[in-house]
Image (spheres, rainbow, N blue to C red):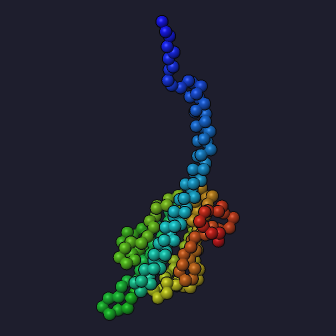
Amino acid sequence: MRLVATRLLGFTLIEFMVTLVVAAILLTVAVPSFVDFLDRNRVRGAADDVVSLISDARAEAVKADRDVNIAMSGSGNSWCIGANAATPPAGGNPVGSATSCDCSDTAACRVAGQRMAIETGAFPDVQAGALTAFTFNSKLGALVPLGDRSFSLTSPRGKYALSVEVNALGQARLCVPANQPEMSGVAPC
């Protein structure tokens, strides 16, 4: 008679407990990094969208030969920003002036027939500072009134901040304000 040794497949209780402890340690280390990653990317996404909107509005002002106004409403967690082009000429009348848009009105904030706005609630956790309304000149794309504009966006937990700066020529850029953690791909102010 021959005895055949059989081995049962599976985990012992000790192996299972060691696996759980290792998983708990890895999770404890990973969660803060993941939350930090989300915080940084939320503010970066909002800032990229704002810079894109401003750049597109400037391009349309020059392309369509009509002034385009950029306006922001709200602040803190509840904000929106939009662009509004001057009305086209009709009946031999000259081009009208660009008026501020109201982001809450879905019929407003139109440039080249398309809605151009970042809606209230698009970035609910990102805090925005106030932005003074300005207009892009239809001939050069420069700001009217002439001068630089900037405002800040802050991450949900307040750790990260980005500044959106628009120079007198209408060019928008992102930068990291002084005394804020660095963000890859964004120059300091």
Q: Residue at x 45, y 67 (%)?
A: 118
Q: Residue furthest left?
A: 91
The answer to which quarter of the image holds residue 99 is bottom left
Residue 88 locus on image (x, y percent): 36, 85
Q: Residue at x 57, y 51 (%)?
A: 35
Q: Residue furthest bottom?
A: 92
Q: How many marks?
A: 0
Residue 188 locus on image (x, y percent): 65, 69
Task: Establish if 129 lies above or below 96.
Answer: above
Q: Residue at x 57, y 24 (%)?
A: 13
Residue 146 locus on image (x, y percent): 56, 85
126 and 102: which one is in front?
Answer: 126
Task: Establish if 30 lies above or below 106.
Answer: above
> With 149 as the anchor, is 140 left or right in this view?
left
Q: Residue furthest top?
A: 1
> With 93 as the anchor, is 47 left or right in this view?
right
Task: Establish if 112 lies above or below 23.
Answer: below
Q: Residue at x 45, y 75 (%)?
A: 56
Task: Establish if 93 lies above or below 114.
Answer: below
Q: Quadrant of the C terminus?
A: bottom right
The answer to which quarter of the image holds residue 184 is bottom right
Kindly tell me whether residue 67 is visible in this rendering: no
Kindly tell me whether residue 56 is visible in this rendering: yes
The answer to which quarter of the image holds residue 176 is bottom right
Q: Residue furthest front?
A: 1
